[in-house]
Image: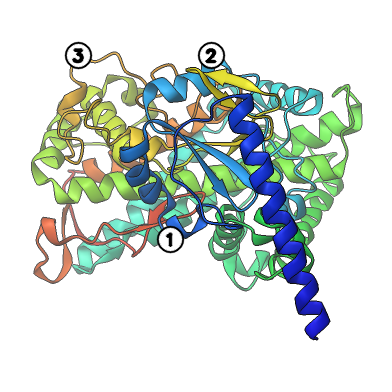
Amino acid sequence: MASTFLQVLAVIAVLYFLQELHNKFMKKKKKLPPGPKGLPIIGNLHMIGKNVHQDLQQIAKKYGPIMSMRLGVIPVIVASSPHAAEQFLKNHDVVFASRPNNRAMQFVAYDQRNLAFGKYGPYWRNMRKLCTLELLSTLKINSFQSMRKQEVTNFVTFINLAASSGVEVDISAKLSTLSANMACLMVFGKKYTDDEFDERGFKDVIQESLVIAATPNIGELFPFLDVFDLQRVVPRMKELTKIFDKFLERVIDEHVQDSKEEKQTKDFVDTMMNIMQSGEAGFEFDRRHVKAILLDLLIASMDTSSTTIDWIFSELLRHPIVMKKLQNELEQVVGKNRLVEESDLEKLEYLDMVIKEGFRLHPVAPLLIPHESIEDCTIDDFGIPKGSRVLVNIWAIGRDPEVWSKPEKFMPERFVGSNIDLRGHDFQLLPFGSGRRGCPGLQLGLTIVRLVLAQLVHCFNWELPNGMMPNDLDMTEKFGLVLARARHLMAIPTYRLHV
């Protein structure tokens, strides 16, 4: 036992010595961006708490919008301003287009064969092109319009039942169910209940996988500790992988059995299986790839949209004047005799301002999924070494007082007359990222957010339960790849339409 302990100490001492040599070499080779001095071995890990995006914002206030840190043995560059984001995501996009290894996604996404975490290269480029053209095109998104209308109508009907009884509604839970239903219908062609997936349900299993993926892995930060798996990442991810794989295999088998049936609207599984069986992809494309992409689509369409609506609606409840102004716009454009249609959305200018302001204050991915440099690069006279992880803190950018006046205040009117959009061209507002790694599902996500949020505001008046005042609403964040509310949003509806 004593000899083993001494061996571990010796390994740590050698690693520390090599790290110091590496740091001195890098400083001589090219000046790194400024950053806080790290401790031996752990680097700057001690400066990071539960809310990583908030901690990095505070550190950046001292060291600047492009700063360097070390988490274990991994060099990390943090970008916290629009200029910095533009450097990494536009001007040097190719250099930073790859992803670092992620142990969780190596398990659950079939060795990172998905779009979100896939390594940059020919496979990833071909797969993204295929998904953009075949799964996320305007034509494909529009083909599900009647489904979205039916599910939103069901959603409104349920809330109306609660309104007639005067009971409070768990908005967070209902939004999650609505998103899950729409995601399943688009991806799989039918709804699946939680029991059909796993006893823990879609939401809990997906959230656990996202939390593990977002949590710094000790085995990656300190490779000599990887064999010990101190966080038990491997058994946890093996269990989750088994759940996902069993479900996806079942879904694919069902589609293979039903492949002879003619469908008016083909779901995403139909489309992917047709491509796989036809050989039209032009690159390696088997069930592993199909399952990895389906999982991507399921997680992205289920979790991000519902979380976004949850945050924006929370802000509307905290700001009754904004809520009323949005209701007035909806009355003028839609009237009070029908629900909002997708064809109405382009006419709702104030709704778009509300959504932009919601994205600014509450981006669902506060730190864009980490980028990794594939070669040495110079940005603003700073040397960025090959293999560096780059974190773009869009949460900090959205609250930067040098970019936004009164940044902590929810003010949709700040976008009056503004040309800022959400498509990654304006680096002060990047909820969907930008460049090669920008979210390909932007159009679909925006459509769902606009439609559901408009319906919530148009169909009902709302009040908080137990006499709670708007300013008392708890807005605590729960950090992860997707930044959710720490506590579910509860509110009491009153139906306001004439239909």
Q: Where is residue 247 in the image (x, y as percent from the top left)?
A: 74, 59
Q: Which of 212 and 403 is in front in this view?
A: 403
Decide which of tag 3 and tag 2 comes sooner along the chain: 2
Q: Give left or right: position of 389 versus 170.
A: right
Query: Would residue 96 be seen by someone viewing this image from the given angle?
Result: no
Q: Give left or right: position of 186 versus 279.
A: left
Above or below — where is 365 with respect to 465?
above
Among the 4 quarters of the image, the one containing residue 158: bottom left
Cα separation between marks 2 and 1: 32 Å
Q: Nearer the viewer, residue 315 or 121?
A: 121
Q: Nearer the viewer, residue 443 or 431?
A: 431
Q: Position of residue 231 (x, y in %)?
A: 65, 69
Q: Which mark is residue 417?
A: 3
Q: Give left or right: position of 80 versus 315.
A: right
Which residue is denoted by mark 2 in the rendering?
91
Which residue is denoted by mark 1 in the rendering?
50
Decide which of tag 2 and tag 1 comes sooner along the chain: 1
Q: As drawn, which residue projects farthest toward the bottom?
A: 1
Amino acid type, callout 3:
Gly
SS of the residue at dot 1?
A: loop
Alpha-carbon neighbours of circle 1 within 10 Å: few (<14), some, or many (≥20)? few
Q: Position of residue 275 (x, y in %)?
A: 83, 29
Check whether the beta carbons of the residues at disc 2 and disc 1 lie within 8 A of each other. Answer: no
SS of the residue at dot 3?
A: loop
- At a point 62% along the width and 40% down the height, the residue shown is 23
Cα separation between marks 3 and 1: 38 Å
